[in-house]
Amino acid sequence: MTAATSSLARRKATSERVIETLLFLAAALGVFTTVGIIIVLAFQAVEFFAIVNPVDFLTGTVWSANIQPYHFGVLALVASTMLVAVIALIVAIPLGLLAAIYLAEYASMRVRNLVKPLLETIAGVPTIVLGFFGLTFVTPNLLKPLFGSSIGTFNGLAAGLVVGLLITPLIASLSEDALRAVPRGLREGSLAMGATKFETTRRVVFPAALSGVMASIILALSRAIGETMIVVLCMGTSPKLTFNPLESGQTMTAFIAQISSGDTPQGSIQFKSLFAVALVLFAMTLALNLVSNRIVSRFRNVY
Amino acid sequence: MTAPAVAAAATRFDPRLAQRKLWGTIFLGACMVAIGILLVSLVLLLIDILRGVPWLDAQFLTSYPSRRPAQAGVLPALVGSIELGLIVAAVTFPIGVGAAIYLQEYARDSTVTRLLRTNIANLAGVPSIIYGIFGLAIFVRALALGTSIMAGALTLSLLILPVVIVASIEALRAVPNSQREGALALGATQWQMVRGSVLPAAAPGIVTGIILAMARAIGEAAPLIIVGAVGFVTFLPTPLAPGYTVLPITVFDWASRPQADFQGIAAAAIIVILVIMVFLNVLALVIRVRLSRNIQW
């Protein structure tokens, strides 16, 4: 009898252990993905850097991967990427923060239930659809009448505006969470001192939520840098170092998409350059995400 | 407060209350303008896409791509997108839910656990096109799946796994502890407790998360460009055979052409994507309501 129960107990323990191991492996898959991404990018980039000097790559300002003489100066791609990201932030920071403050501090339950799904809808629209919107509406119907012939069919401004529309809900929703996390007592204290609602929001609530707001903006910047379909459709594929938003250009993501969708042979220098560009892109977004996480975890300890 | 601080505050005090309130009104107006701009953008987006309506008919849904817009259709893309979405759901369901169960029900607060959590948060921020490059190296080449739907689906699965895991963790977290304690008190092992007591209670949230992740995968284009989806496919794709297209890639192909008619059918294909997404969202809602009906605590 005792032997039977103990063997039963042991069998259960084994199956429990097997299940726990399987569940752990599922959770650990993400680590393999991260490590795998880094290994894939690094190995292929090393092959590229055996041919092109990394210093020339990182400091060069001319990118010509398809037309001889070949130049691999990644700054031309980085400049377009940053141009789009900056325009996107100029759009998204005021829109997103105003929407967040309105939802967290002013909106009634009824208005909130109306506006929040609207923001979530924008966030859920596939980026290819937003890219189509930029190419077929924003540039011809909004920007052409404003700038006339000085603006091209492909331009950084349309790309930036539409990417801004994409990341606005991200800033709005994360900032709203940060504003809501501010304890009620702070608001009540400020109002009791005679401050108006706006003064309370501006001088008490917003500063208290600032770290969460900053984290949301950094996350949105990272998202803007990594966005592909919108910039491919709106900004075109002609790499050049320019900060003129009316001209076409090519971001890092757009270059990766262009090379891999064409007939570029896999062993060629162009194909290898793809991994070096991807490594720069990955490093930039990872750094931004880590900074954002760090800010959030510090912010969490405040209350 | 010290005396100088009080004095400083007193000099900063602005007695003009009407003016101070005016600033508040102006600010509220700015908030309204911001919400208005977002609303108008969404409306303009819809209007822009409505240009596809005249192209949308049975012929469009049952035809293959063509060089002539009037004869072109989205059948291979539609089939490709559905196959892709189903495989993504089938792959991410066990792995995503398993990972969430481990992190929420099993993991102790250790360095390894914190590493896993941080890693998932970081993966959610990796640009989708980077996943495409990883999928190209691993699934297309190393595992020799070629430019098949399977390779594309596995790539997208990695991309949306963090979303599924986070949604599932939220669902598990919402299950009250009494549910766990009750099962354990009846002699259940940890896994019996999770499977019999926690998972059914968390099912509505988990299923909703999976379906919404599937919708996201169906709208994704960038990583699939890298792993070999092409715009022009004149046969119905099967999961393991090379060569396929999906709706977003078809949109990309058509939208890149300068002719107005191609923009029209691109908009029509966008409507098909959005209809699928709305359908999946409604499905998620219905399933959540249905499954929650039996849950009481």
Image (cartoon, coloured by chain):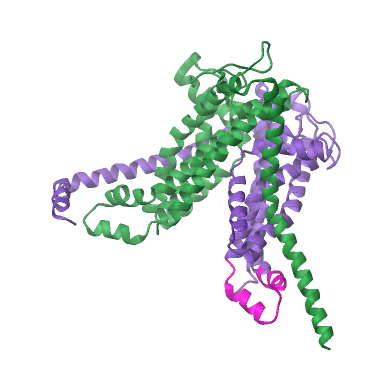
Chain colours: A green, B purple
Can you say whether A297 is above or below A10 in the image?
above
Give the x, y percent position of residue B279: 67, 50
**Placement of the N terminus of chain B among the 4 image quadrants:** bottom left
Can you say whether A251 is above or below B164 in the image?
above
Can you say whether B113 is above or below A137 in the image?
below
Identify the residue shown where x is 65% and y is 32%: B267
**Placement of the C terminus of chain B among the 4 image quadrants:** bottom right
Magenta stretch: residue B173 in it? no
Say if residue A166 shows up in the picture: no
Identify the residue shown where x is 63% and y is 34%: A128
Which residues make up the magenta segment?
B174-198
Say if residue A208 shows up in the picture: yes
Q: Main secondary structure of the magenta part?
A: helix
Judged left or right of residue B73, residue A207 is left
Give the x, y percent position of residue A16: 75, 69
Query: In this orientation, which residue lies closer to the viewer: A12 or A122?
Result: A12
Give the x, y percent position of residue B288: 64, 61
Circle count: 0
Can you say whether B229 is above or below A170 in the image?
above
